[in-house]
Each structure stands twice: as C-alpha cells, then as structure tokens.
Amino acid sequence: RTQTWEPTAADLAAMGYTLADLEAECYVCGSGEREEALLLCDGNCGRACHTDCLRLPAVPEGDWYCGLCVRNGVAPADYVPPRPLPT
C-alpha cells in the first residue's frame, strides 16, 4: 500500500498533529528519509518508525500505535498490532 495523501495544516490539526510532526525520525534507525514508509504513531506521542525497521511487509491498514503507546494503554483495548515478518 502506498501513502500518497498530503495533509494540510488544518487536516493535521484536526487529527492532533502539527506540520513539525511530519518531520519525525524513525525511533529505530534515526532517519527521517523514506517518508512513504514512515509510520506516525496514532497515540499522538510523536514517535515514528519505518515499516521495514518494524519488519512489516507494508504500511498497515487503519491506525498504528508504537509499542510505548500500547504498553502505556494509549492504544484502544482491542488494538491488534500488525504482525512482523519472520526473521
């Protein structure tokens, strides 16, 4: 799946984000490159991660929450994290 939507500042504000959040860096590799594969946590914590750094085959459907937000109970109780590829 390819992410191609370019949100406006108003779109981001309605979702609880700012333009600065789009400058996020992957918490695994530290890079902000390859934006098409960079997931932004829907827990509004500001964390981001590349799909390949999480060993995900593609951008997951629906919301994505980082492990920190899952552990801290920010993610909905019925949230099921996407399954990584086998190592």
Image (tube, helix red, strand yellow):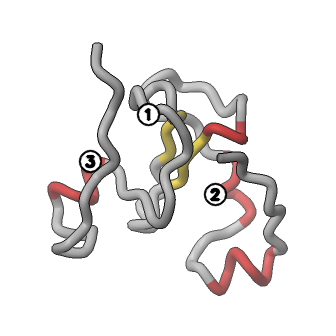
SS at circle 1? loop
Q: Considering depth in this image, is 15 or 36 the residue closer to the camera?
A: 36
At label 2, the amino acid type is Asp
Mark 3 or mark 2, whichever is nearer to me: 3
Circle 2 Cα neighbour tier, 10 Å, few/some/many (<14 / 14–19 / ≥20):
some
Q: Residue at x 48, y 32 (%)?
A: 57
Q: Amino acid at mark 1?
A: Leu
Q: Earlier in the sequence, mark 1 or mark 2?
A: 2
| Relative to 15, 49 lies left or right | left
Read off the residue under disc 3.
Answer: 67
Q: Position of residue 44 (x, y in %)?
A: 45, 67
Which residue lies most toward the top here?
87
Q: Quarter-wise, where is residue 69 in the image?
A: bottom left
Whichever of callouts 1 and 3 sits on the residue coming sooner in the sequence is: 1
Under mark 3, the amino acid is Gly
Kindly identify the residue that appears in the image at 34 percent across and 47 percent down.
82
Res. 56 mark: 1
Where residue 50 appears, as percent x and y from the top left, is: 53, 34
Q: Residue 8's spot in the image, x, y percent?
A: 84, 73
Q: Is residue 10 above or below residue 25?
A: below
State how far apart marks 3 and 2 are (Cα).
18 Å
Query: Label 1 crowding class (10 Å Cα cut-off): few <14, some 14-19, many 20+?
Result: some
Q: Which structural element holds mark 3?
A: helix
Q: Residue drawn at (35%, 26%), measured in percent from left and top? A: 85
According to the picture, the residue beneath numbered tag 2 turns out to be 21
Q: Is residue 39 above or below residue 7?
A: above
